[in-house]
Image (spheres, helix red, strand yellow):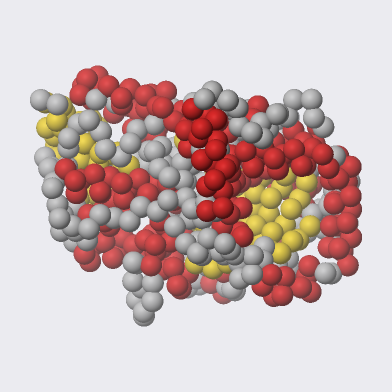
Amino acid sequence: MAGLSAAHELIERGFRVTVYEPAYLGGKARSHDVPGTARGGRMALPGEHGFRFFPGCYQHVTESMERIPLRGGGNVKDRHLINVETAVIAFDEAGYAPTTAPASIMGFVDHAADIVELDNLRNALMTGLKFVVDIPPHELAYFVSRELIIATSCQQRRLGQWENTPWIQFVKAKGKSPAYERYLAGALTRALVAAKSHTASARTIGQIGLALATSATGLIGQYDAGLVNGGVDRILNAPTNHAWIDPWVTHLRTRGVRFVMNEGVADFAVSGGRISGARLQSGGTVDADWYVAAMPLDRLKPLVTPGLVGADPLLAGIRGLEDDWMVGIQYFLSRRSDIPPSHIAALGTPWALTGLFQARPWNVDFATTYGDGSVRDCLSIDISDWEKPGILYGKPAKRCTKQEIAREVWAQMSRAMNSGGKKLLRSEEIVTWSLDPSVTWSPQIANATPLMVNTAGSYRNRPTAHTRIPNFFIGGDHVRTNIDLATMEGANESGRRAANAILAAADSSARPATVFPLWELPMLEPFKAEDRKRYKAGQPHFLDF
């Protein structure tokens, strides 16, 4: 994502751009064909690293989509980015039942029959009553007050205090009800941003929560979202590569970007405080004016050599950053789901599962489009916790076989989704399944695509897009950005920042690439100004008691 974004911005501004890619274009945002599944003129079953989710506060990736033309007219955003109008909230605990809720007023209008259906109303009432019993109202109010602290904190306090505070400590889960710790402090964080509440930065979690809530209000004109028309939750209406990545690469090639596939960098040579060349994994070398290391954290770390650190000591902090696993699995089913187009948050499941049935929101007939004609839907699930024991084998995902992972994920999702008296998931309907091929066993389990995690205090170790090496720049979801979360949005923003840094270094007169802020409600500014005074004076936030 960072490399394609940087290439897009630079090729439009007159630079000659070459992209070296050792594996596949699109990175963790890619989709892939499930090998050997195409039959009778149909396309292969659509596999993914994980289902794609575009919150209303995303601006960079959607603006890039607007600039990718499609054959037949239009662009990627207008033709392929659609609203998900409802959400299914499920709990992995007896007494709760999965409930379908609208994501907007139009979502309620379009799917009123499903939402007011008797079973769903009963589930909502049962779950709501139990939730109020399990998490007392004063604890709910307290949790909201903690988010208000983030909303009204000045930037200096966010970076100086909340960045160094773990989320679980910030929301003060100790001593509160078990459900407060399990759901509000823990499961909600895992479901939204795949972060561990015990280690994640309170600034990062609080800020992204604030951005999601702010975009949902519809009060920020810069966000394509609101409670009336939706847009709070968006997805692509086709496999990611078909809808977005492939047209993007085609467009960049048309503009003149050169792609060198199956080739990656082995190291950077440093001479006189500058990059004097890049050695490729094949043994060749690259001589360029400007170098952008647009790659995931786990691929960048081995390249942070003494030579690089000697030229820019701040790069040593990259070695202190951490990553974690978040990987997708798809279940291809013989029956089309009858629930409305919805993201599923299975709160409290040991492996922190979230999911999406794809046939209805894609508005596609799977049987005539994909596979051998026996598949009518796909349930795409993200696995966000690979270290907690499961319910079938008592083992974390990192200690399971491929088949055990598939059975365990289905069992956990089924327990949460089938707890309302209606069997939404049926094992006999599984035709086949596909786990992200980046997870391998040889013989130990490994993951080629880990995700950087924003642990408390990690901001100081994260690089900026520009470095002290005048011709060396960094892109990736680990780079400091406005959204400040390891996402395709952050990676896209980092690519733009790298491009802008090159424009400055080259003394180019070209217009810089647009970098969007995370918009917050203007009415909060007086509170932030007051907090700025209090923080400077060494006083706590006025709500922090």
Q: Nearer the viewer, residue 300 or 395?
A: 300
- Visible residue check, residue 522: yes
Coordinates of residue 239 in the picture (x, y in percent) = 49, 62
Q: Quadrant of the C terminus?
A: top right
Name the residue located 50 percent from the left edge and 64 percent from the top edge.
221
Q: Nearer the viewer, residue 495 or 4?
A: 495
Name the residue located 54 percent from the left edge and 45 percent from the top edge.
526
Coordinates of residue 286 in the picture (x, y in percent) = 14, 40
Coordinates of residue 177 in the picture (x, y in percent) = 82, 32
Does residue 330 sit above or below 394 in this rendering?
Answer: below
Does residue 470 sit above or below 518 in this rendering?
Answer: above
Name the residue located 22 percent from the left edge and 54 percent from the top edge.
10
**Position of 125 compared to 503: left or right?**
right
Coordinates of residue 270 in the picture (x, y in percent) = 15, 27
The quarter of the picture where residue 333 lies is: bottom right
Q: Name the residue furthest bottom.
A: 72
Q: Nearer the viewer, residue 157 or 493?
A: 157
Does residue 71 sit above or below 358 in this rendering?
Answer: below
Name the residue located 85 percent from the left edge and 51 percent from the top edge.
127
- Visible residue check, residue 341: no
**Position of 97 compared to 61: left or right?**
right
The quarter of the picture where residue 166 lies is: top right
The number of numbered discs placed on residues in the rendered structure image is: 0
